[in-house]
């Protein structure tokens, strides 16, 4: 058992700047949790508090049921992988891997066994006698991971481990981390600013902004049911299309979303949720994911500015009354001419429209995490 | 565009570099030739009171002379004495002044810049060796070939063959530099012993010092070594200055190996006329005192004083400034050697001037230093100086006693009254407010080449009161104790070969003697075996005989041509 | 502008010469830019080297170094130095004062910089660094004056000792006190200054390295050894090579100022001896140059040895 519990964790720096406000998070044993958010959102600080590299200003941190607020990093039974690898440049790969064990006075034979085992897993056995300088970025990152692995930590912390690698290597290493995870069965806390990494790696994703947690949930949850405008915009590629100055109307007990003068009658589920949430007609920001746009029908009009053929799909940038609209259309579905300068009609399914309160920017339907976790029929329609 | 710009840049650089290298002799006056000088510029040198050049010469001829000056002196171009000289001679000299430290750095550069040297260097500070080497290379003007233009200097050399012999280059028998001569008789004996009157009286009253009564405590007191030992011990053990601390009195003080106020007089107790070079002339023979057995005895005697705390060890590490600073304020000096008491202590009236200490064997003599009163190499003229005849005639005026006095002490009109007194002596003006006589002198007197000797002291200028006081003290209490057969070693001229010997051995000799001497003085004395080893080392590797021979040869030449 | 219009690649194969011309042309602006630097280095650093010729001459300022009037004396200036009775003592004194100074003075700034770097508060570190650096700006004359004030017979140290009932000790007269005083005061004056370069290097150490070491369980000291020290190791090697190269080079000013008859036996260095001979006898530039050249040769040999050794045992070397 090695669950990690963050209870009201808070970080205030000496200059009175609060970097992390009240983070509550329960990480289950063997869970892979990803902290994601733009730079400066406090995700790294949170991780570093867990690691013991930053003092905890307030709140409690439990690892494996033990309160570790004031426990030295090396005694927390954790290991961490850093963005810059942080290898000892004057030591060989073998010594780098063995260093932590040596400091713990592990017998030499055990060290050797363990190091060789880890090197085997990471496929770096042939580099053991080299110095870090002689390795490529990917190899160095593997050594850095190996250095964490030899200690058999209860919790594996990773601070943007892939961001120093080029795109291709990053994809490769990402896959390896997934593989790795299946081999070393332990709890992971992973920090990244890259939502793709977060979506592909995490069992659950914690989305942070300005020191606050915005949403915690599985990749599906945060993608389909973003609790607010920020999460909606942060998660998903390409970024969700937002239409400002839209209206939520109610006529005869039925809710409509009015986007650029076009009315969409909302689905049953949405009607019910809105009524239950006690929503009154108001100004809204409507969100439509590029994947959910259908071209060639409907009443919304847009002028195409760029149209990129990506093979299996078209990536179309269009302009709709000043708003940029990105559409991701599977090539097989495309019947309309989408060459540059053409004006096309487009529409979407009403149940896929996300409704954000213009004032609070909260999602009117899944305004909090609890509601976002509810099983909703809308999920089933994601079949792209 | 870019290309053009960079080409221009490079071109500018090259041009400026080229310009650096090629500033030739553009500014130099052409040599006019003696006939033209006489006919056109009215050059005359026979009458030392009339102008050297006519008005035309004053306008058209000029000389550039490089000179260091002390920090408080005015620029020589602005000095009244220089302007007076121009008015009297019509010779225009443009002075280029630098500080003394700058000069010592630039001296080689000036000589090195063969294309663009000044006409002459004043305060040149040329050593005999330098003069020989440069003379050989024909860089310097052989002044002795043109003595006709220098009536004062020529007469000086005729009157004073001893000075002439200090100047003559051995290699070719010529003179290449002009000297500074200031004969006051002050330099030969650099030390006078002063004794604290009140403290000595206390010692007499306490019965610590016998054979002397309080009435004897006046200038000229001569103590025996034993008496001095007892007296210094009394100073050491008692709180003489009454500040409650019996440990801060310094019984006897001097500044070890300083050019004056040094330890050498103590060797007089054993009949040695020591000096810092340990080299004197006895009966016409160059003698090194360190080879004398008496030197050993004296060293042991003094070392005992040091070991007993009668001479504070601080005397061996003091600088002149420290010594002077310590004398002020709280009275700490019992007996001390110095040039004069007035600069050392704030209450000189409490110190009496003593005759030399009478040694254990009855010897009573003093240090004879080799500090020369004739400074050679004070001015040199470069061989390529155009119209050097005029410049020589001009500098000759400096040796006129009245000019010499003004060069040395300051001009008439600032330091001296226009009117002389009934004996024809220069009369000191009253000092302006807020300036000391030293400051006024340093501001207005360039110093440098002069000839002040008995004639001048008797007929032209009074000695400064302080110099006079010291001279009186020396005459009364020091010079009578100088043996007739012992003389200081004068400025000598060496051959190149001799100079090489000196270069090779003398620094080493000095180091060797100095290192050993201080070891003995501070370490309680020298054992007979150490002394023997020292002697054999001296005559062996250190080559004292070689040095002695060089000096003896040079001295013989000096005497022989005398 | 003209160059721009030309096609980037001329068709067909270029000869080696053509290619060289081509690269010359392409790099012309850069070559022009470094030209002044090269020129200055050549003019002021290389051209004057021919001045060592005067070590083999009887030279006086104003002489031409190469002309028919030049007085060549061969190795006479050198033999004069080697046969000087003071030669071995001078070598010994110079070598000892340099080697002791080096042994103490070389690691000191490294240790200080490591210590300053691991101070917890930046502010204290900066403050201390300023204090440590300040003595560097004291002139030698003032420094020796300070030494006299502190270590003179009636100086502070002796006054304290005397007050506590001890004997006064003449630091300036005892030859055994000269080297410690000279070396320690030099090191005191310069350790802070020399540490600056290491401190700069240390500030480039990735903080993640430290954090990784903390997580590995390294103590503060272990982190200094395994993170900080390796980070400045290349700098240390370079400094080591350079200071070994300058091992025999010691100026005369300070030794001369501290020299008394009492410590003459150890305070007479090559440089002070040359200075004295130059000042007191005939100023002998040729002789001084000969000794300087001899000194330089020793230094170059030391430098080559140090560099070769360093190259063999680590990856760091000057060339």
Image (cartoon, coloured by chain):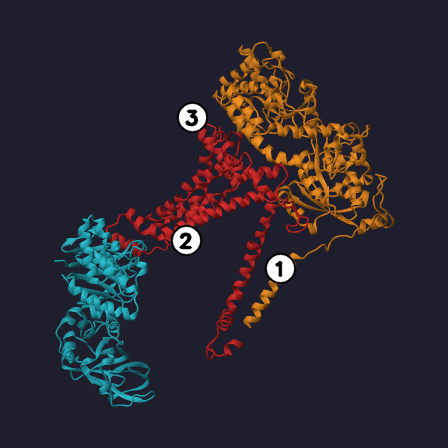
Chain colours: A cyan, B orange, C red
- Across and down, in percent, residue A108 comes to 20, 49
- Across and down, in percent, residue B537 comes to 55, 27
- For label 1, the SS is helix
Question: Which of the labelled discs sits on residue A184, or is there none?
Answer: none
The residue pinned by badge 3 equals C163
Of the pair B309 and C230, the residue shown nearer to us: C230
Q: Is B182 displayed left or right of B271 in the figure?
A: right
Relative to residue C53, is residue A262 depicted above or below?
A: below
Res B213 quadrant in image: top right
Q: Residues within 10 Å of mark 2 (few under 14, many from 20)?
A: some
Q: Is B518 displayed left or right of B185 in the figure?
A: left
Q: Label 1 marks which chain's residue? A: B
In this view, the mark in front (2 or 3): 2
Of the pair C10 and B479, the residue shown nearer to us: C10
- Across and down, in percent, residue A331 comes to 24, 85
Separation (CA) of disc 2 from disc 3? 53 Å
Res B149 quadrant in image: top right
Q: Label 3 marks which chain's residue? A: C
The answer to whether dots 2 and 3 both sit on one chain is yes
* Extreme residue in the front direction: C74
The residue pinned by badge 2 equals C317
In this view, the mark in front (2 or 1): 2
The quadrant of the rendering that contains the C terminus of chain B is top right
- For label 3, the SS is helix
Separation (CA) of disc 3 from disc 1? 65 Å
The residue pinned by badge 1 equals B17
Q: Earlier in the sequence, mark 2 or mark 3?
A: 3
- For label 2, the SS is loop
Q: Is C47 displayed left or right of B119 in the figure?
A: left
Question: Residue visible at 21% across and 62% down?
Answer: A122
């Amino acid at each position: 058992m090695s669950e990690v519990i963050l209870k009201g964790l808070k970080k205030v720096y000496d200059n009175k700047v609060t970097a992390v406000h009240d983070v509550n998070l329960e990480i289950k044993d063997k869970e892979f949790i990803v902290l994601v958010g733009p730079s400066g959102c406090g995700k790294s600080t949170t991780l570093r508090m867990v690691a013991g590299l930053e003092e905890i200003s307030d709140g409690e941190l439990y690892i494996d049921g033990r309160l570790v607020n004031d426990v030295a990093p090396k005694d927390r039974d954790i290991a961490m992988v850093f963005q810059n690898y942080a290898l000892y440049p004057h030591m060989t790969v073998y010594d780098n891997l063995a260093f932590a064990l040596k400091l713990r006075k592990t017998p030499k034979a055990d060290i050797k066994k363990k190091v060789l085992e880890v090197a085997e897993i990471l496929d770096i056995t042939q580099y053991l006698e080299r110095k870090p300088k002689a390795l490529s970025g990917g190899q160095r990152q593997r050594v850095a991971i190996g250095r964490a692995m030899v200690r058999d930590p209860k919790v594996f912390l990773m601070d943007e481990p892939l961001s120093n690698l080029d795109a291709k290597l990053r994809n490769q290493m990402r896959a390896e981390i997934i593989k790795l995870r299946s081999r070393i069965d332990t709890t992971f806390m992973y920090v990244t600013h890259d939502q793709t990494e977060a979506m592909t790696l995490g069992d659950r994703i914690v989305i942070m902004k300005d020191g606050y947690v915005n949403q915690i949930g599985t990749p599906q949850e945060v993608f389909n049911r973003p609790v607010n405008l920020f999460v909606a915009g942060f998660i998903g590629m390409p970024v969700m299309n937002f239409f400002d100055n839209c209206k939520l109307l109610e006529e005869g007990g039925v809710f409509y979303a009015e986007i650029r003068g076009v009315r969409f009658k909302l689905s049953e589920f949405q009607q019910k949720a809105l009524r239950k949430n006690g929503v009154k007609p108001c100004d809204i920001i409507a969100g439509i994911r590029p994947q959910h746009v259908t071209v060639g029908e409907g009443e919304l009009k847009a002028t195409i500015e760029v149209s990129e053929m990506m093979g299996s799909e078209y990536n179309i940038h269009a302009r709709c009354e000043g708003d940029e609209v990105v559409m991701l259309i599977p090539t097989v579905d495309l019947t309309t001419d989408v060459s540059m300068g053409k004006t096309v009609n487009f529409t979407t399914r009403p149940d896929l429209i996300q409704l954000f309160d213009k004032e609070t920017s909260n999602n009117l339907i899944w305004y909090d995490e609890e509601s976002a976790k509810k099983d909703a029929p809308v999920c089933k329609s994601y079949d792209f | 565009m870019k290309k053009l710009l960079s080409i221009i840049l490079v071109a500018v650089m090259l041009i400026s570099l080229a310009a650096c290298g090629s500033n030739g002799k553009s500014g130099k006056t052409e040599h006019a030739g003696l006939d033209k000088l006489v006919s056109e510029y009215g050059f005359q040198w026979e009458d030392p009171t009339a102008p050297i050049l006519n008005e035309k010469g004053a306008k058209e001829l000029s000389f550039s002379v490089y000179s260091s000056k002390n920090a408080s002196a005015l620029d020589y171009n602005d000095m009244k004495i220089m302007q007076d000289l121009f008015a009297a001679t019509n010779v225009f000299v443009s002075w280029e002044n630098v500080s003394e430290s700058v000069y010592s750095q630039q001296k080689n550069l000036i000589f090195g810049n063969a294309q663009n040297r000044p006409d002459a260097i004043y305060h040149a500070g040329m050593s005999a060796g330098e003069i020989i080497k440069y003379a050989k290379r024909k860089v310097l003007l052989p002044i002795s070939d043109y003595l006709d233009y220098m009536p004062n200097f020529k007469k000086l050399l005729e009157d004073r063959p001893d000075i002439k012999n200090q100047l003559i280059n051995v290699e070719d028998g010529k003179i290449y530099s002009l000297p500074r001569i200031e004969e006051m008789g002050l330099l030969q004996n650099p030390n006078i012993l002063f004794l604290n009157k009140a403290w000595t009286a206390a010692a007499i009253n306490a019965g610590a010092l016998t054979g002397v009564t309080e009435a004897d405590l006046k200038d000229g007191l001569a103590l025996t070594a034993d008496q001095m030992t007892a007296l210094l011990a009394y100073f050491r053990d008692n709180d003489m200055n009454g500040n409650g601390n019996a440990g801060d009195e310094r019984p006897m003080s001097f500044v070890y190996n300083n050019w004056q106020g040094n330890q050498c007089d103590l060797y007089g107790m054993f009949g040695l006329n020591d000096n810092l070079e340990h080299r004197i002339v006895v009966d016409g023979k160059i003698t090194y005192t360190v080879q004398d057995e008496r030197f050993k005895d004296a060293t042991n005697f003094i070392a005992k004083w040091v070991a007993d705390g009668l001479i504070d060890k601080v005397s061996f590490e003091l600088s002149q400034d420290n010594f002077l600073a310590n004398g002020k304020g709280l009275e700490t000096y019992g007996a001390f050697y110095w040039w004069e008491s007035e600069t050392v202590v704030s209450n000189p009236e409490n110190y009496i001037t003593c005759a030399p200490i009478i040694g254990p064997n009855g010897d009573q003599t003093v240090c004879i230093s080799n500090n020369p009163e004739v400074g050679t190499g004070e001015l040199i003229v470069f061989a390529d100086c155009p119209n050097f005849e005029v410049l020589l005639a001009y500098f000759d005026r400096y040796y006129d006693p009245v000019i010499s006095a003004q060069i040395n002490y300051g001009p008439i009109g600032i330091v001296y009254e226009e009117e002389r007194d009934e004996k024809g002596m220069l009369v000191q003006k009253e000092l302006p407010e807020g300036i000391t006589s030293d400051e006024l002198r340093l501001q207005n007197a360039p110093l440098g080449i002069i000839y002040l000797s008995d004639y001048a002291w008797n007929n032209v200028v009074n000695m400064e009161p302080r110099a006079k006081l010291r001279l009186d003290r020396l005459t009364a209490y020091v010079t009578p104790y100088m043996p007739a057969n012992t003389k200081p070693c004068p400025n000598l001229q060496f051959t190149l070969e001799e100079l090489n010997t000196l270069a090779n051995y003398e620094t080493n000799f000095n180091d060797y003697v100095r290192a050993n001497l201080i070891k003995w003085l501070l370490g309680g004395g020298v054992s007979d075996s150490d002394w023997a080893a020292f002697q054999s080392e001296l005559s062996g590797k250190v080559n004292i005989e070689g040095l002695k021979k060089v000096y003896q040869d040079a001295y013989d030449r000096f005497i022989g041509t005398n | 502008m003209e160059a721009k219009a030309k096609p980037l690649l001329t068709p067909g194969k270029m000869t080696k010469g053509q290619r060289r011309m081509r690269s010359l042309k392409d790099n012309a602006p850069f070559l022009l830019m470094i030209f002044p630097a090269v020129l200055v280095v050549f003019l002021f650093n290389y051209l004057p080297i021919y001045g060592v010729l005067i070590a083999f001459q009887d030279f006086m300022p104003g002489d031409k170094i190469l002309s028919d009037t030049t007085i060549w004396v061969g190795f006479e200036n050198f033999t004069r130095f080697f046969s000087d009775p003071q030669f071995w003592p001078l070598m010994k004194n110079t070598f000892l004062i340099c080697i002791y100074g080096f042994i103490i003075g070389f690691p000191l700034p490294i240790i200080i910089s490591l210590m300053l770097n691991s101070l917890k508060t930046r502010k204290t570190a900066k403050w201390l660094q300023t204090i440590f650096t300040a003595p560097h700006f004291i002139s030698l004359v003032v420094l020796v004056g300070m030494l006299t004030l502190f270590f003179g017979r009636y100086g502070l140290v002796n006054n304290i000792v005397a007050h506590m009932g001890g004997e006064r000790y003449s630091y300036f007269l005892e030859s055994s006190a000269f080297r410690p005083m000279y070396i320690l005061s030099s090191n005191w004056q310069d350790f802070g200054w020399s540490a600056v370069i290491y401190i700069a290097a240390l500030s480039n150490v990735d903080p993640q390295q430290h954090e990784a070491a903390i997580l590995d369980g390294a103590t503060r000291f272990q982190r200094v050894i395994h993170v900080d020290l390796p980070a400045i190791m290349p700098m240390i090697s370079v400094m080591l090579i350079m200071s070994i190269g300058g091992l025999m080079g010691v100026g005369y000013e300070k030794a001369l100022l501290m020299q008394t008859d009492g410590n003459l036996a150890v305070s007479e260095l090559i440089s002070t001896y040359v200075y004295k001979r130059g000042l007191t006898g005939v100023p002998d530039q040729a002789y001084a140059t000969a000794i300087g050249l001899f000194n330089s040769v020793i230094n170059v040999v030391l430098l080559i040895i140090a560099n070769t050794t360093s190259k063999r045992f680590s990856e760091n070397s000057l060339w």
